[in-house]
Image (tube, rainbow, N blue to C red):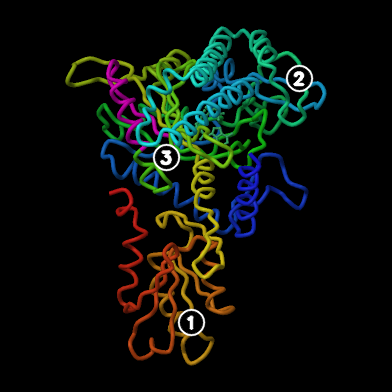
Amino acid sequence: MANQDDKFKKVIAHAKEYGYIFGSSEIYDGLSAVYDYGQNGVELKKNIRDYWWKSMVYMHQNIVGLDASIFMHPTTWKASGHVDAFSDPLIDNKDSKKRYRADVLVEDYAEKLNIKAEKEITKAKKRFGETFDEAQFKATNPRVVKYLTQKEEVLQRLAKSLGDENLADVKALIEELGIADPDTGSKNWTDVRQFNLMFGTKLGASAQTATDLYLRPETAQGIFVNFLNVQKTGRMKIPFGIAQTGKAFRNEIVARQFIFRMREFEQMEMQFFVRPGEEMKWYEYWKETRLKWHTSLGLGDENYRFHDHDKLAHYANAAADIEFNFPFGFKELEGIHSRTDFDLKAHEEFSGKKLQFFDPELKESYVPYVVETSLGLDRMFLAVFATALQEEQLEDGSSRVVLKLPAVVAPVKAAIFPLVKKDGLPEIAAQIVDTLKWKFNVVYDEKDAIGRRYRRQDANGTPFCITVDHDTITDQSVTIRDRDTMEQKRVPIASLATLIAEKTDAEHWLG
Ligand code: ATP
C-alpha cells in the first residue's frame, strides 16, 4: 500500500512539474476536485480525445459526431430519471466528520477479500510450479473458497439492498463487516442517505423569471434529444451511432483521487442505436471493440479487466465496466451499457414527440434500443500518464525518469537540438523545426549539455530527439534518438517526417 501511495504521489508531482496538471485556482489555495491542464496536459488530453474520435467516428461509416450544449431544457433531466434517481448513498463518520460513499466502502472491503484470495493463489503458484492447476486450486482450496464466497455474498447483499433502496441494510452491512473509517479507524457511523449529484444553476436575468437548470451530469442526453435530427439529416440507417465528447459535472461526495474523480470532467460517449432484440449482440461487440481500443495503446493487457454489474442502473438491462489497474488498484475506466429504449421512450413521453425509426427492411417503426460506450477522458489521461511514468536503472549504474507515453498521444513528438549554439547549427535546427511543425508538434531546445536535454525530453514523454551536429552541414544528416530504447541512428533530414509519422500516426496504432 505504501508503495502504491508513493507511486501515486510521484505521478501527481510529475504531472505538475512538467506542466501537465495544476490544481484549479491554486493561488487561492485551489478548489476541491477541480483541476487545470497545463501546456503539455492540454496536448495529451487533445491527442487522447482525437485517438478516440478517429477510432469511433472516422473508422465507422455508421457513426457520426455531435456537439450538444451543456445547458439543456430542465425537463430532459426529469425524463432521464436524473432528478429522481441520480444520487449516491452517502455516510458520514461522526468522529472524523469525513464523508464517504457507503457503496464504495463495501466494495473496497470486497476487493480486499479478492486481494487475499489472489495472494494465496500466487503463493501456491510459486510452490507448485509447472504442475499448478489454478482453476482446481480456486475451486478447492478452503481459504480461497472462503474469501471468494464471502466477497460474492457481500457484493450480492449490497446490490440487493441498493436495488431495494434499503439504506438501513447498507448501514447494517457496514456495521456487520466492521468497516472502519479508512483514515481514522473509527466505526461511529451516521445513517446512510441518498445525495443527488447534479449541480443546479439559473438561466435568465431577473430572479422572478429565471429558470432552474442543471449542468449536465452526462453527455448522453444531448445525443438522445438530437437522435431524430441526426438520423433524418444524416439519413442514418439502423444500426448507427452518435459520438460526442464534452464536459460533464457531478457534485461527487468523495473526490480525493486527483483527476480520477472530479466535479468537472470530460466524457467521451457514443450511443449506438439498434433494432430491439439485437442489443445483446451489439453489447458484446462494443465490449470487445472498446477493450481492443484500450489495449492498442500498449499499456499492458494485464492492466485491464471487465467487471459485470450486479446492480443495474435504472435504464440498463446489461452493463459492464472496463477496469484499469490505476496506482490505487483496479477501478472503473469505461462503462458499456445496454440502455434499452429507456431514454428515447422517456423523452417521447415527456416531450410528446415521436422518436422512432422506420425500418425499411422490417417495414415498421420502432423506438430503437441503445448500447452506450462511456469513457472519462480525464480517467483515461490518468491511466496513460500513471502507467507511462517509470524510473529506469541504466547499465552505467545511473537512473532516469522516463514518461513512456504511447507516441500517438505524446504532447511533443520530437525535440530538435543544435549540438552547440554556434557554427550555423541553430539555424539548421530551426529550419528542421519549421518544416516538421506543419505535421507534428515539435520543440526547439538549445539550453544545457545534450545529455541533460535528452533527460528533460525523456521525463516529458517526447518520443524522439533530433540532434544537429557539425557533420550535418556537409552530409544533410542528423542523429535521431529513440526515447524508449535510447538508440541513436544517423538519418537524412529528408527522411525525418516519414520516420516520425511511422511511430506517431494513429494508423499505425489503430490499424
Ligand atoms: P463511478 O462508479 O466511478 O462513480 P459511474 O459509474 O458513475 O462512475 P458513469 O456514469 O458510467 O460513471 O460515467 C462514465 C464514465 O465517466 C466513467 O467510466 C468514468 O470514466 C467517467 N466519470 C464518471 N464520473 C467521473 C468523475 N467524477 N470524474 C472523472 N471521470 C468520471
- 2 or 3: tag closer to the N-terminus: 2
- Quadrant of the image containing the N terminus: top right
Q: Where does the magenta region start and end?
A: 269-291
Residue 287 on the magenta span = yes
Q: Position of residue 162 (x, y in %)?
A: 57, 12
The question of residue 335 being in magenta is answered with: no
Where does label 3 land, which residue?
302
197 versus 45 height, above or below: above
Residue depicted at 42% across the width and 71% down the height: 481
Mark 1, mark 2: which one is toward the viewer?
2
Q: Residue at x 52, y 34 (%)?
A: 330
Q: CA distance from mark 2 to mark 3?
A: 36 Å
Task: Find residue 305 and report its horizontal and vertical position in percent.
Answer: 43, 33
Res. 222 visible in picture: no
Q: Which mark is residue 418?
A: 1
SS type, badge 1: strand
Q: Amino acid at mark 1?
A: Pro
Residue 193 shown left or right of residue 306 in the figure? right
Front one among 509 and 246? 509
Q: Quadrant of residue 19?
A: bottom right
